[in-house]
Amino acid sequence: MGFIFSKSMSENMKNQQEFMLMNARLQLERQLMMQNEMRERQMALQIAWSREFLKYFRTFFGIAAISLTAGAIRRKKPAFLFPIIPLSFIFTYQYDLGYGTLLQRMKGEAENILETEKSKLQLPRGVITFENLEKARRKQSKFFIDK
């Protein structure tokens, strides 16, 4: 009788462990999907911000370029054209970010860094561990009682 009961308990325990493992995997998958969804939304927001900024900057750049060109022609001083150069770099960058391939190039460079320059990504003192966190928490905690 005891053998049957212990066999049934063992089988229930195994089923419970399998259920817990499956539940943990499902929870991890959901967390990963949520993180990816948040990352995609943040990237979309960044692109949208860049496009909106570009609308205003395009107007400013156009007015500034026309005004500076007219001033340079009217006063016969080409120095009035110099501010157009840095403004054109800003305009080009924002256009490339909003409508061009800047994000794809940045992604490719990030993948290259992850593959070939792993040492530059290491944290000082290495990866944070649970033991290190506990040690720091105990050091700061006034309520911790060491047993």
Image (spheres, rainbow, N blue to C red):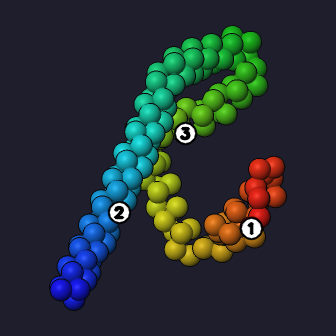
What residue sits 69% from the left and 17% below the top? 72
What residue is disc 3 on?
A: 93
Q: Residues within 10 Å of mark 3 (few under 14, many from 20)?
A: some
Which amino acid does the dot numbered 1 rest on? Lys
On residue 147, which mark appears? 1
Q: Residues within 10 Å of mark 1 (few under 14, many from 20)?
A: few
Cα–Cα gap, marks 2 and 1? 31 Å
Residue placed most toward the observer, 84 or 39? 39
Mark 2, secondary structure of its residue: helix
Q: Quadrant of the C terminus?
A: bottom right
**Is 124 placed left or right of 102 in the picture?**
right
**Mark in front: 1 vs 3:** 1
**Is 111 placed left or right of 138 in the picture?**
left
Q: Quadrant of residue 66?
A: top right
Which amino acid does the dot numbered 2 rest on? Ala
**Mark in front: 3 vs 2:** 2
x, y percent for residue 35: 42, 49
x, y percent for residue 140: 81, 53
What residue is disc 2 on?
A: 24
Mark 3, secondary structure of its residue: helix
Height in image: 37 above or below 147? above
What residue sits 42% from the left and 43% below the top? 38
Residue placed most toward the observer, 9 or 60? 9
Question: Which of the two discs, 1 and 3, labels the residue nearer the N terminus?
Answer: 3
Mark 1, secondary structure of its residue: loop
x, y percent for residue 123: 69, 66
What residue sits 73% from the left and 17% below the top? 76
Cα–Cα gap, marks 1 and 3? 59 Å
Q: Quadrant of residue 99?
A: top left
Which amino acid does the dot numbered 3 rest on? Tyr
